Amino acid sequence: MAKVDKPVTVAVETHGCKLNQADSLVLSKEFQVAGFSIVPAYSPSDVYVVNTCTVTHVADRKGRQAARAAKKRNPNATVVVTGCYAERDRESIEAIEEVDFVFGNTSKTDLVKTVSEIVGAEVTTVEHFADFHMADYSGRNRAMLKIQEGCNQVCSYCIVPYVRGRERSVPIAEIIKNISRFEREGFHEVVLTGTQLGSYGFDLQDTTLVDLISCVLERTKIPRIRLSSLQPQEIDVKLLDLWDNKRLCPHFHVPLQSGSNEVLKRMKRKYSSDDFARALKMVRGQVPGASITSDIIVGFPGESNEDYLRTQRLCEESDFSDVHIFKFSSRPGTAAHHLLDNVPPTLKSERSANLIEIGKRSFSEFRRKYDGRTMQVLWESKKSGFDDEKNVTGLTSNYIRVEALVRNTNETLSEVVLKFDENDPYGNMGVLSDSVPQRKKLFGF
């Protein structure tokens, strides 16, 4: 087939998790290979693709709003909705006047081909999207790579197993091949992502996540390797021993969801609050300076004041470097949908606000520890300033966002002195370095 012979533009808007981000990057790559021109998500475009999330009713609403907003930007555009919401409730999305086509997760294989037919052009198709092992980059220097898809856990509140399917792992050889490509293209970090990372390899012969990481460390040279998420029960000494290799980023996202054992049982989580605390203690004991982030759900059906206070106490004791708080949202098709949602919305909001404040304090306290310390930063994006100066943002290995004004440097991975800014609304740390990394002099951030 011939590639698109006219500059048809495509804008891809992504909602939700890192897995969705990885999917959007694959879609963008497919469009590029087919000859389309990729433009920023909110730019005027011939085609809009909205990659949706469905973990809460708020996520659903944002997906609908995004589709309508896309049509407003260009009434003549083709609006395509895909992702988890499209997989879960195709009929509701098809009923939206502004939406032209809907593709669930299981039908993404046909998305680029269908769009090309809509715009009247033949394309070079990219096969095996459903195999999900293609990858692309996020920003300029960090790459996201999906190593696993699907979940067999079936937590009572979670719709993900129904919209992502059963667990499937990408073979190690394919992962190494992709990371090697990133190395050749000059990337400095790869983020290994999936629905249930700790289950990696259960469907492959004699293969575990430890085996995969060991092979990546042995057979690649990319400077940084980061994991997107681990469950508390998946963290053990054998896994953490791998962090003796400094290429592994000391950042662990470990979902808590609740500090109450009774609530955890109703959620069908496979750990207790004590298990969670032990996992965090193990991480901090073996990986000094580790950043630990988490997720918490408030207002789960039957959550009493005592249940909530246990969650609040564990949140305070855990010293998270960041924590995301979600108010329980009943999802049709899940076991929890049949439970009596008996926590009033006002009480959910109150509990959520309390935990958010606790999270903000621990967020600041973690960053304050690094004020004046020299850390290695991977610069991700640049915005042109004046003369030879550029505003730059990047990440330390332990996931501190850094913002700087850098002069005369093309460095992408460098050591700088961090500066805590009490007034930064986003919690970024600042640094100004005259010649990164040789000089560490701050000059007026």
Image: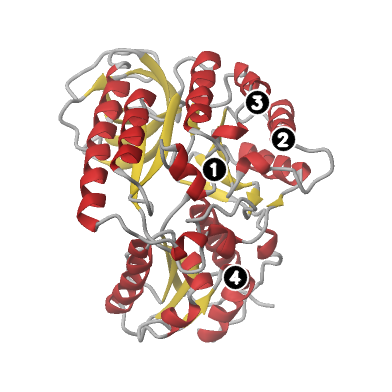
Given this view, does label 1 or label 4 mark the residue nearer the observer?
Answer: 4
Given this view, does label 2 or label 1 mark the residue nearer the observer?
Answer: 2
- Sequence-wise first label, 1 or 4: 4
Q: Residue at x 37, y 27 (%)?
A: 409
Residue type highlighted by circle 2: Leu
**Which quadrant: the N terminus?**
bottom right
Q: Secondary structure at mark 3?
A: helix
3D distance between C-alphas at marks 2 and 4: 27 Å
Coordinates of residue 2 in the picture (x, y in percent)? 66, 77
Residue 425 visible within the image: yes
Compared with residue 276, is residue 162 higher up or lower down, i.e. above or below? below
Q: Residues within 10 Å of mark 3 (few under 14, many from 20)?
A: some
Residue labelled with disc 4:
108
Q: Nearer the viewer, residue 131 or 300?
A: 300
Residue labelled with disc 3:
239
- Sequence-wise first label, 2 or 4: 4
Q: Residues within 10 Å of mark 4 (few under 14, many from 20)?
A: some
3D distance between C-alphas at marks 1 and 4: 21 Å
- Sequence-wise first label, 4 or 3: 4
3D distance between C-alphas at marks 3 and 1: 22 Å
Mark 1 and mark 2 in contact (Cβ < 8 Å)? no
Residue 212 bears which disc, if any?
A: 2
Residue type highlighted by circle 4: Lys
Q: Nearer the viewer, residue 391 or 326?
A: 326
3D distance between C-alphas at marks 4 and 3: 34 Å
Coordinates of residue 348 in the picture (x, y in percent)? 26, 51
